[in-house]
Amino acid sequence: MSIRERLDTSAYLVVGPENTARPVEEIVAAAVSEGFTCVQIRSKVATAREMIAILDKSAAVIHELGKSDSVALLVDDRLDVVLAAREVGIKVDGVHVGQSDIPVAVCRKFLGEDSIVGLSAPTEELIDYVKTADVSQIDYFGAGPLHVTQTKIDCGRTADGRIITRSFDEIAELAKVSPIPVVVGGGVKLNDIAELKATNVQGFFVVSAVAGADNPRSAARELVSAWKKIF
């Protein structure tokens, strides 16, 4: 069974060097050791070579924890980085793209059927889009933001500059109509987990809640425990 077939987005970490004063791989290790199931390396400041180095170290800590076959390691936007990292033997499992990034079909063509391709759902016309989108080559939707977030200041921003956050009712409707898993983030905190789980989405994603915590391992443990204890 490929990692695409066993993809688990229930506890999804997004992290890059601009999100933490610690080495990125240290944050990855903390999250994965405490039950995070998916890791996305995202950076708008790192060079391709720096991204590859981060992926190398992150893949290594996931391997050391015995989770290479169950925890997906993804890259935000940079299909070129995924391909280059794979070329030098780094286990990278796929890519996450936005509406204005490289098209999903192109990602799928270059990465193959066993790879994971995630797509950010659009800010506007969200529900209608998810109802009608061709999801044949997409593994999950990323949606949000739940709250305004400083880690991605354009998250939820419309063409005219407004920021649209998502209510729990909207998220519940999204989970109901989406034909593929939905993972929600954008300023998610520990006290949001119960309400978010109640919407029936497949998971949450966080950046600063773990990467910016005084104790990333403890923060990751609390988030995963909160998610698992609610049925």
Image: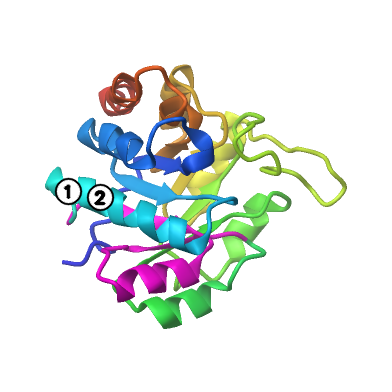
Q: Horizontal and vertical percent for residue 27?
A: 34, 35
In this picture, residue 111 sits left or right of residue 169: left
What kind of element bears circle 1?
loop
Q: Horizontal and vertical percent for residue 220?
A: 32, 27
Write down the region rendered in magenta: 69-98
Residue 71: say if magenta: yes
**What residue is drawn where x is 25% and y is 50%?**
71
**Residue under label 1:** 67
**What residue is drawn where x is 22% and y is 45%?**
61
Packing grade of label 1 (10 A; few <14, some 14-19, many >=20) is: some
Q: Horizontal and vertical percent for residue 69?
A: 17, 56
Instruction: For residue 11, say whether it is visible.
Output: yes
**What residue is drawn where x is 40% and y is 17%?**
214
Please identify the residue farthest to the right as the structure is shown.
Answer: 160
Q: Horizontal and vertical percent for residue 178?
A: 50, 54
Residue 162, image quadrant? top right
Amino acid carrying mark 2 in the image: Val
Residue 201, image quadrant? top left
Question: Do the residues under discs 1 and 2 have CB atoms within 8 angstroms?
Answer: yes
What kind of element bears circle 2?
loop
Residue 213, image quadrant? top left
In this picture, residue 170 sits left or right of residue 36: right
**What residue is drawn where x is 14% and y is 43%?**
65
In this picture, residue 146 sits left or right of residue 7: right
**Residue under label 2:** 71
In front: 14, or 55?
Answer: 55
In front: 100, or 202?
Answer: 100
Instruction: For residue 179, say whether it is visible.
Output: no
Rendered view: 79 above or below 129: below
